[in-house]
Image (cartoon, grey):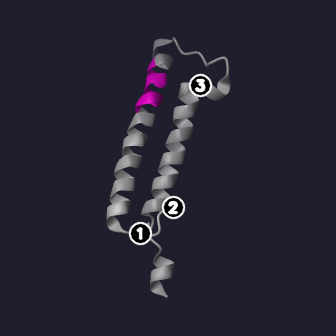
């Protein structure tokens, strides 16, 4: 997102690959929290802002938002 030509296809490819790998890690971490909930062993961390379940949920939203910004097309700029 900070490179001079962020719309080049190779940069979009590398950004999407790295982003989707990050999303997979966040989803796995989040599902480990759901598995603990299903087993009845889940408890929030004492410090809520370092709870892995909440951090993985937040990181998943951020990663998907960044991928959306990278991969979305600028149709308005292309049409004029």
- Nearest the viewer among 9 and 58 is 9
* Residue under label 3: 51
Which residue is drawn at the image coordinates 33% and 66% (left, top)? Answer: 9
**CB atoms at circles 1 and 3 under 8 Å apart?**
no
Q: Secondary structure at mark 2?
A: loop
Nearer-N-terminus badge (1/3)? 1
Q: Is residue 9 magenta?
A: no
Question: Residue 7 shows which numbered tag?
Answer: 1
- Location of residue 57 with respect to 13 vertically, above or below: above
User: How far, Cα to Cα, is label 1 from label 3?
Assistant: 36 Å
Residue 6 is drawn in which quadrant?
bottom left
Q: Position of residue 25 (x, y in %)?
A: 41, 35
Label 2 belongs to which residue?
2
**Which is more foreground, mark 3 or mark 2?**
2
Instruction: Give the x, y percent position of residue 24.
Output: 38, 38
Q: Please identify the dominant SS of the magenta region.
A: helix
Residue 20 in the image: state x and y as whole percent: 38, 46
Q: Which residues are magenta?
A: 28-35
Relative side of 72 to 57, left or right? left
- Residue 30 belongs to magenta span: yes
Residue 77 vertical placement versus 65 (above, below): below
Q: Residues within 10 Å of mark 3 (few under 14, many from 20)?
A: some
Secondary structure at numbered mark 3 = loop
């Amino acid at each position: 997102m900070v490179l001079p030509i962020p719309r080049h296809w190779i940069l979009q490819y590398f950004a999407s690959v790295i982003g989707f790998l990050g999303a997979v890690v966040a989803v796995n971490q989040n599902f480990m929290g759901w598995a603990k909930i299903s087993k009845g062993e889940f408890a929030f961390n004492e410090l809520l802002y370092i709870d892995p379940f909440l951090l993985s949920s937040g990181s998943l939203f951020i990663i998907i938002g960044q991928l959306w910004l990278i991969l979305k097309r600028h149709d308005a700029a292309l049409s004029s």
